[in-house]
Image (cartoon, rainbow, N blue to C red):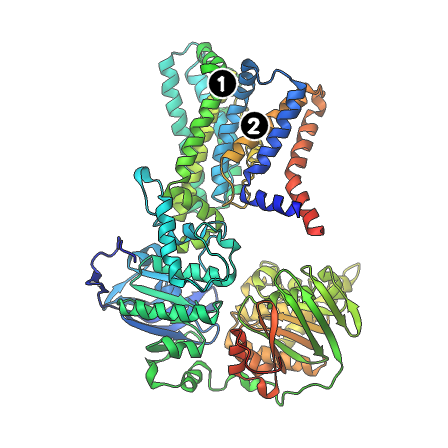
Amino acid sequence: MISSLASFPMVFYKGRFMALTLSAKQIVKRYGGVVALSDGNLDINTGEVVALIGANGSGKSTMSKVIDGVVTLDGGQLLLDGNPVNFSSPQAAKKMGIATVFQELSLIPQMSVADNIWLTREPLGPGGVVNRKDVFAKTNELLSLFEGTFKTDLRPEVAVSELPPDEKQIVEILKAISFNPHILILDEATASLDSRQVNRLFELVTKWKEEGRAIVFVSHRMEEIFRIADRYSVLRNGKTVGAGNISEVTEKDLVKLMIDKDSVFSYSRTGKRITEKPVCLEVKDLHSHILHGVSFNVHESELVGLGGLQGQGQRDLLLSLFGDIPFTGGIQYNGKPVHFKHPRQAMKQGFALVPGDRNREGLLYIRSILENFQLPSWPRYGFPLKIGQAKKDAKKMGASLNLKMAGLQEPVSSLSGGNAQKVVIGKWLMRQPGLLLLDDPTKGVDVGTKAEFYGLLTQLCNEGKTILFYSSDDEELLGLCDRVLVLHDGKIISELVGAALTKENLVSASLGVANGGVQ
Amino acid sequence: MKGFAWGGLMSRYPALFALVLLVIALSINLILQPNMFASDTLNSNMRVFLPIILLTVGQAIVMLGGGIDISVGGIVSIVNTILATRVGLEGSAEAMWQYVAISLLVGALAGAINGFFISYLRLQPIITTYATSFLYAGFALFILPNPGGGIPAAIAQFYRTTIPIGIPLAFYVIAVVVMLWVYLRSTRYGGFLYAVGGNAEAAYKTAVPVSRVIFSTYVISGLMAAFSGIAITMLSGSGNADIGSAMTLNSITGVVIGGTAFSGGVGGVVGPIMGAITLGIIQNIISFAGITTWWETLAKASIIVVALAIPGIVNLFRRRE
């Protein structure tokens, strides 16, 4: 299929790649004050699929970026067949035959599928002119690998920005394999694929393995790991806590390794209730760009989870409720119909939205903790400003959230990820909201702080606040929520409650195969 | 929905808006100046537009790569003062050639200074080139404190009156520039340019040499500014250290009217060329409409602001629907 092996002519022999081992030893990587990896270890052998497993924020993505040369090491080393190597840039790693399918994708939205896949390796004609015909032909060859799994007519000349998430993901996969890599890293490559596409990918992975490639499979989906991996390596809190052959362990063993002994889910709500309190939020037939008819009710002081694969409309739903994006459909809050056209109106009614991307949407990064806490609340401190009172209230909030800070005047940028997220939640709690909308609030938050969050959410519910909670972490939804609404393709495909709220049901509903729960 | 199709067309062909604007401006100009397509009139217009067109092309390349170059006017001034002081009114054609070559080197060097700060020291393009614009403008003043000097009249005359087969010289220059762009666009470098402007982070991960590409855009911009300086010197025939200062903003406006986005990665060079011509024609219309000089700046700026706002207004009404 791919004949040119410009960078590594020696590795390909009689249709197979030469055997080699790449080992990462005691890798340390810090981002500012946050330690992403403190003791990361991984052995990658050709002809094998190794699963890199861990909870969200355990350092999986960082580990794959270290191997691919995107980030530089703060400690430890990489060994290629026992000899130290150093990838100072993605170029260096690519030269060694390493390619990555990035979780956040590495595509240029405005450029076409073909241009994206062959960027830096475009076939050239006379005068250095890119041979478009060749590019398209080679792209079609690659696209044929996933033939029959596309919902749209995916052609080489279409701009990537026009593709749905699953097809973007496939383009990213094809781009990585177009490098003809010796080592292929798949970082959450299945997250937005449907089951048919996942099956196709796994057939290909099996083939690639037989060709003598090494595959690193980064995922938190147990079922997929057991289907495809030969070996496993588990990360917890930036440390490798176990590795071995997948045939010698059970799913339970791996989960045990992934989760601390005193698991954060000891905080899960005792005796989840189906509340008899009145309905406080009623959503009827909500439509938007991405949502296609969403209806549900939320009871007072209920903690309702939104589940499903990423990008199925969870974020749109929260933003619609908060009046941040236009939508059609009916919303009733406390019995009154509301249709917010601006977040200000939603705030007045006691809504609060904790956005997903805290650096971009949640915080004024270089401003002080005090300013961030009080940003939505300044009008309450009147004119002239009662700055003393504002400080006192912010201090109280900081203490109640157990915020670790040097002082209220310090910029938010001085805080760790978890503490910064506390500020985002705190700034809304200052307003005593009745309904909290949370958009994946624990993403990139350390385990200790997560546990505090879970405690906080439970406490808020017990105080009578209502919470609508989207999380990309299934464990969180299972551990915390009274009820989980699973979204798929802009619709609620399944409602899981009580005994039906199980991991199996949640995962299968996420993939669009609703076989459990109340339909 | 008619409006929607129009929007889709606009996003696919960003230069379309520039073309529409150009046709409107041309039509109005034609009413005010019926003989504008006569060979002589056309030439006297195009030789005035050419320096801005060249400058706009360089600016477009920088903006495609996600940057901006505010120092181009300063580079034009340096080149103008070098030619006016070193070649002189009595100079020879050889001296002219020699200093044209030196001018191009100076332009590339000035661009390289910008590029070094921006791509290797990771400074903000707008701050860096704002600062270097004073450096370059100051250097031009150092070379030629008071307006004066010049180039041989014959050379200026050649630029002003050459009309091979009845088509103004400027069109040949534009044709060469467009052909070079079409070539550049179809090489790997062209792809890198769009990739870096579209998403530098993703380009880096794909092993695109991001720093080198950004560096190169400023060198190209410096070179184009030098060409622009040579053209404007031949047009005016004399030296003035302040000659380039008003040209920077025009080059940026030309690019934006031409559908090349401020954010980078979208557009091309042909749209900005049309944008630059449109700007020139707007200037024409104002002179022919008999607007007093006091109102000229205001009138010109109003037309440009409205022209820039049209795509946004179209979008606003689409959202309302």
Q: Which residue is mark 2?
A: B277
In this view, the residue in front, A236 or B106, is A236
- Check the image and report above or below for A226 versus A410: below
On the question of residue A494 being in view, the answer is: yes
> Which residue sits furthest bottom?
A271
List x then y, in percent, for residue B257.
Answer: 59, 36
List x then y, in percent, for residue A514.
Answer: 55, 78
Chain letter behind tag 2: B
The reply to whether the C-beta atoms of the residues labelled 1 and 2 are less than 8 Å apart is no
How crowded pointer 1 is (Cα within 10 Å; few <14, some 14-19, many 20+) is rated as: many
Q: Are marks 1 and 2 on the same chain?
A: yes
Question: Residue drawn 31% across and 59% down?
Answer: A180
> Which residue sits furthest front?
A148
Question: Residue drawn 49% across and 38% down?
Answer: B268
Please indicate whether residue B25 sits to the left or right of residue B237 in the image.
right
Please count the marks in the image: 2
List x then y, in percent, for residue B123.
Answer: 48, 46
- Check the image and report above or below for A428 versus A478: above
Chain letter behind tag 1: B
Tag 2 or tag 1, which sits nearer the N-term?
1
Q: Which residue is mark 1?
A: B168
Question: Residue drawn 59% across and 63% down?
Answer: A410
Say which amino acid is labelled 1.
Pro
Please indicate whether residue B240 sits to the left or right of residue B94 in the image.
right
List x then y, in percent, for residue A149.
Answer: 45, 65
Say which element carries label 1: loop
Say which element carries label 2: helix
How crowded pointer 2 is (Cα within 10 Å; few <14, some 14-19, many 20+) is rated as: many
Say which amino acid is labelled 2.
Ile
In this view, the residue in front, A61 or B9, is B9
For the residues labelled 1 and 2, the Cα–Cα distance comes to 14 Å
